[in-house]
Image (cartoon, helix red, strand yellow):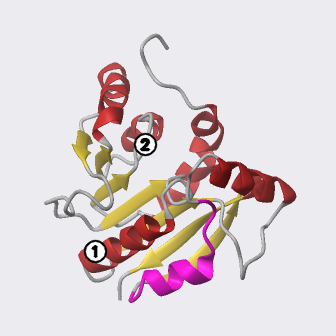
Amino acid sequence: MLNKPYSQACENNKQPILTELARIFSVSKKVLEIGSGTGQHAVYFAPRLNHLTWHTSDLPNNHSGINSWLTELPADNLQPPINFTIGKDHWPDLAIDAVFSANATHIMQPQNAKLMMQLIAENLPADGLFCQYGPFKFEGQYTSESNQKFDQYLTEEGYGGIQDIADLEIWARPLNLLDTIAMPANNFILVWQKP
């Protein structure tokens, strides 16, 4: 693991997420991952979803870490990271039909989370899919005491905090929320589709 960033959470959740993505993205062709983080998800998912082209993206200062994972675990369908900072960069010039993001929404400030939802809604093609993984609130309520404590920690550290699905639905229009899938550790996958 020398010189590579490492997330234990990514190791813990990668297989449960993959199980859902294999089903949800079964007919998708090109996926943009927003906030690839360490790169661990990308190098795990891409070779196991080899019908897809997987595009990584993140803030520029995370690219070296992502590239270190891609160098060690390359895949023919896995693309190097592109610069994409919500609120700073334009939507990437890619012909994608799906978007994936894990544990990014609650890190963003609310205005950037809103902008991300709007950008995805604007740029997905008809029938395009967006899978959004992480902790969420339901009608103002936390799904667990641990998520409430996590949200308090996030806001104290200057992050945006856990977002309410009702707000995401407003921000994401005209995307439709097709499914809310309960995942381990009080997380969820929200499955959105462009009409």
Instruction: Please state which of residues 36 and 53 is positioned toward the viewer in this rendering.
Output: 36
Is 64 located above or below residue 187 in the figure? above
Question: Which residue of the protein is positioned furthest toward the top in this rendering?
Answer: 2
Q: Is residue 176 visible?
A: no
Magenta region: 161-174
Earlier residue among tags 1 and 2: 2
Q: Viewed as shown, does residue 94 lie left or right of 131? A: left
Q: Quadrant of residue 161?
A: bottom right
Residue type highlighted by circle 1: Leu
Instruction: Please state which of residues 25 and 55 is positioned toward the viewer in this rendering.
Output: 55
Residue at point 66% right, 38% down? 12
Residue 86 in the image, given as x and y percentages of width and height: 33, 59
Helix, strand, or loop for circle 2? helix
Residue type highlighted by circle 2: Arg
Numbered tag placed on residue 124 in the rendering: 1
Instruction: Please state which of residues 99 and 138 is positioned toward the viewer in this rendering.
Output: 138
Residue 60 in the image, given as x and y percentages of width and height: 28, 38
